[in-house]
Amino acid sequence: MTAERVVMQVVQESGEIVETPLTEDDLKLTWNKSVCPYCGVGCGVLVGSKEGRVLKVRGDPNHPANYGLLCGKGATLPQMVSPPARQPEAGPSGAGIALGDPLAGGEMVRTPDRLIYPMMRRTRADQFQRVSWEAACERIAAQWRRILHDHGPNAVAFYISGQLLTEDYYVVNKFAKGFLGTNNVDSNSRLCMASAVSGYVTSLGADAPPGCYADIELADCFLLVGSNTAACHPVTFQRIRRRKLAAPNRVKVIVVDPRRTRTAEIADLYLPIQPGTDVALLNAMLHVLIRQGLMDQPFIQQRTTGWEGLQAVIDRSTPEQAAAICGVEASRIREAALMFGKARAAMSFWAMGVNQSTHGTAKNNCLINLHLATGQIGRPGAGPFSLTGQPNAMGGRETGGLAHLLPGHRLIAREQDRQEVERLWNVPTGRIAPQPGLTAVELFRALAEGTVKSVWIICTNPLVSLPNLAVAREALAKAELVVVSDIYHPTETTLLADAILPAAQWAERDGTVTNSERCISYMEQAVDPPGEALPDWRIVCRVAQAMGHREAFAFQTAEEIYEEYKRLTRGRDLDIGGVTYERLKRSPIQWPCPTPQHRSTMRRYTDGVFAHPDGRAKFLAHDYRQPAEVADAEFPMILTTGRVRDQWHTMTRTGKIPVLLRSEPAPFVELNPEDATRLGIAEGELLTIRSRRGCARAACRLTRDIKPGSCFMPFHWGGLRGEAVVNETTIEAFDPLSKQPELKFCAVRLEKVTGDT
């Protein structure tokens, strides 16, 4: 790639796009293709390096996810790469510190907490000590052999991450499910996308959005539900915004969110519903579509089932009934339905506001019902599109990275699926257990109860991100062996580990990821990892080999892993038999792509044939039901949690970048002035947010952008920063099908912090 083709475009705070011309120094860099390691948009990036150091990152103008655009987080990626290590020293808790000079050519930061060699300790009261890779793997293997012998395979577990590459995910699943015999492999994607998965599977028959980002430029109506797209998926938001600005009278935007965020600034219609009432709203919109005759009757009759069973629920779901539940006017519900129903091509986008719910699957089904009723699916500019929170949440599901899955969108509970995987892995029939494993919340409960004895946590920080953190802390405290693979130490989670293993990060290894639109991208390695850090798949292979499985985990390259994984997709809905590293190095590919001659599949279901056995999509009926915990006299406020624009997940990366801390340097709790007056709370005062499970503290921020009776707090800040974590308060209740917890809704009370509290 020539440097002359490199263009940088960054989404600024104003929402405008600016171009930064190449400098003389840029022309001297080596440029490699990669993918931003943050959200599921999957923006292509060009990584500029020199002498083993990453110095610049620019948006890839040829990548279909972003066409050169980058958000503020993506633009500061070079600040995440540590300088090459000199002689390591012992830091806090025995942490390895990579010493080096600040990088030239930009505002780079040192990362003295970068893990550069394995560390272990005999007891949790001891300091971590540096050990060799051989010693670390042998000690972990020895303890796991003992646990497996004494307690059986279900006593061990993996908790992994949507930030892993596809090759990492595949090796973890092969090791755990095929060789250790445990299905206790779940991902932090369970906290993010599980309800979208169950929604797609139950309604359409298979996982993943049917459309693509290119549909944004073809749609004339956007329904955004429970998604602060401007903050959480800024590049996708810019594309929606540009589409709106290009045809402001023709293109309509509907935003549904209890908080009025920057996303609502482009809305023709903003519906500030009460938290958790999405099902009532969506059913009422369908009620209006039926009454106004805006359904696609031929599509319903020929391409779907379940329409008749929907009628009773929709008949009683009037706009007036929904208005009383949702807290918005019936006329505005009708207006939203008519905008959607009269559109030539309508897209819906949603995220955690829909998924993180005890009724998350129902909300997804009801949203997809709107598309099925109007035929707004399987054609250009139309379709339901879930926005994922992590760069490879999709790839993780493809490889079986959840407790109920096997590679190739197979189900553990299905005997034929297990046997197919066993044959390819060359393990005895029956080796893969027939019962699905424990999901995220269940897994940590089992650790706390002592039925699971050991967990390997990879590339995630659950001591900040899980709900009801008291249980998560108890879980790791009781575990006999906690292994954590990460880039940094200390984190809230590594501090409770027995073994810490240093992982390579995004620019330091190669492999693939699949973004929200089913688009597979290849990430080139730009620099070597510091010290003894290794790609996650190599770490897992070393432990697997130490446990006696040398031949099955003798992979030498990520490409070897990918080629083996591909064999498990052949003939499946996500067939990638025609995808190779060679092709991906030229351009990303959307699956399915079954042959070398096949091109990307931009849209699914274009022939009207869905993935259910009968080829038809399903209408699924759901009445509105209340969340698991509602406000009462003791806890009269509803707390909802979420993200801010310039931070990501638990801040182990973005929290190190000064420019990203400027907009939000500390956690806060948003409160409507009406509630503040009633409670005697003023702007900036320190509050305790207390629930039945625990409490957090943050400064008060008064705003009319949140409904009275509700409050909002971002979840990024963890205990290492001296702040009480909001997930001390959140509830473990989860959707019965998706097992995704209700992180968006719990009952709290607010207390002013005084000198005595």
Image (tube, rainbow, N blue to C red):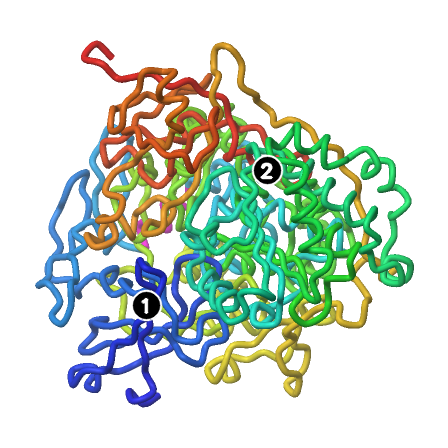
Q: Judge left or right: residue 171 versus residue 77.
A: right
Above or below 137: residue 157: above
Quadrant in which residue 538 is drawn: bottom left
Which mark is drawn over residue 10?
A: 1
The local crowd at label 1, few if under 14, some if 14 to 19, many if 20 or more residues have their Cα within 10 Å, is many
Q: Amino acid at mark 1?
A: Val
Q: Is residue 229 magenta?
A: no
Q: Secondary structure at mark 1?
A: strand
Q: Give the label on residue 438, or none.
A: 2
Q: Quadrant of the C terminus?
A: top left
Residue 32 visible in the shown view: yes
Question: Can you give x and y, in whole percent of width and height, for residue 43 in the image?
Answer: 43, 68
Is 452 placed above or below 596 here? Answer: above
Q: Position of residue 49 (x, y in %)?
A: 24, 76
- The answer to which of 553 and 368 lies nearer the viewer is 368
> Magenta residues: mostly which secondary structure?
helix
Q: Which callout, 2 or 1, points to the residue nearer the camera?
A: 1
Q: Is residue 665 left or right of residue 70?
A: left
Residue under the image location 45 percent in, 52 percent down: 265
Specify the label residue 261 is tagged with. Answer: none
Q: The disc labelled 2 sits on which kind of residue?
A: Leu
How many residues crowd around disc 2 within 10 Å: few (fewer than 14), some, or many (20 or more)? many
Q: Image point 42% across, 72% down: which residue?
A: 44
Q: Earlier in the sequence, mark 2 or mark 1?
A: 1
- Residue 708 pos. (x, y %): 47, 26
Determine the image quadrant of residue 46: bottom left
| 137 in magenta | yes
So how many labels did they put on this image? Answer: 2
Horizontal side, residue 399 vs residue 660: left or right:
right
* Magenta region, residue range: 134-142
Residue 711: x and y, percent? 43, 29
Secondary structure found at label 2: loop
